[in-house]
Image: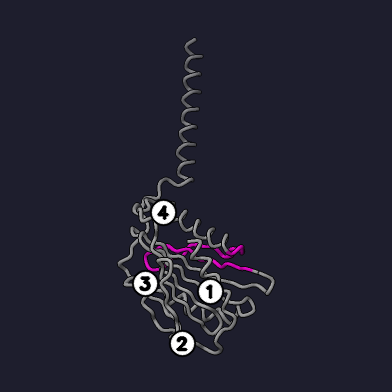
Amino acid sequence: MKKLIAFVSLVLFAAKSFAQGQVPLKPVKIDSLITISLPEKYTKKDTLGQTIYNANGAYGYMTVIRAPNQDKKPLQKEKDLNKVLQDYVKGIKGQSNGDVMNLRDTTVGHLKAKTFTLEVDEGAGIQSRNFIIVYTQDITYTIEYYYEALRKDLAKGEYKLYSASLKISPELQRNDQYLSNAKGMSTAAKVGIFGGAAMLIIVIVVLVTRRKKAMA
């Protein structure tokens, strides 16, 4: 993954200019399960086992990465998925030495995804990359939108159209991310149960002590 991120970073930071004016977006089938809209003039490359789509928008640079997972062992619980997504975010941050902003969970179709913005300043002004990470047992999809901070207001509308065009087949369900929907006992419930149990023990001890004193 590190080699892939480094490669993509080079591609993104090598992009020195953007097309001017509105660039129409058209649906592109990434595979049988994922579709997203890109400008008509996009490139598609197969490298390091991944498929990478790149395109210039009017105000930003778009990248879609379809990467087969090396470890296809099924995740058991939602917490396992959360860890995978958190590790992915850390890996991207570590490669780019930037700041992660607006990190949050979102939903795409039936799947849980992670979205955030990575801000990098290498002395020539802040450069931002919006990410949407979608993990499935077999494939991880990375949706990126790169823009210069000075174009933030202009890029906002284009990114909204681009990200909203991401469509995931209803065939993909949560069990394609992790197997068990059981969330376990919440912290509040644990505190209530164990706290109540402790109180009950105290009451019993007090009653037994009083009974022994009364019988003495």
Quadrant in which residue 14 is drawn: bottom right
Residue 133: mark in rendering:
none
- Of pointers 3 and 1, the one earlier in the residue sequence: 1
Q: Position of residue 4 (x, y in %)?
A: 48, 65
Residue type indicated by callout 2: Pro
Dominant secondary-structure state across the stretch colored magenta: strand
Quadrant in which residue 101 is drawn: bottom right
Residue position marked by numbered label 4 in the rendering:
78
Q: Is residue 157 above or below residue 122?
A: below
Q: How many marks?
A: 4
In the rendered image, the residue lying farthest to the front is: 48
Residue type indicated by callout 4: Glu
Residue type indicated by callout 3: Ile
Residue position marked by numbered label 3 in the rendering:
34
- Of pointers 4 and 2, the one earlier in the residue sequence: 2
Q: Nearer the viewer, mark 2 or mark 1?
A: 1
Q: Which colouring convention does the figure follow? A: one colour
User: Is 141 positioned to the left or the right of 17 in the image?
Assistant: left
Which secondary structure lies at badge 2? loop
| Residue name at image x 52 percent, y 60 percent | 89
Q: Residues within 10 Å of mark 1 (few under 14, many from 20)?
A: few
Q: Residues within 10 Å of mark 4 (few under 14, many from 20)?
A: some
| Residue name at image x 56 percent, y 82 percent | 59
Q: Which residues are magenta?
A: 96-120
Residue type indicated by callout 1: Val
| Residue name at image x 40 percent, y 50 percent | 183
Q: Residues within 10 Å of mark 2 (few under 14, many from 20)?
A: few
Residue position marked by numbered label 1 in the rendering:
11
Residue position marked by numbered label 2 in the rendering:
24
Q: Nearer the viewer, mark 3 or mark 1?
A: 1
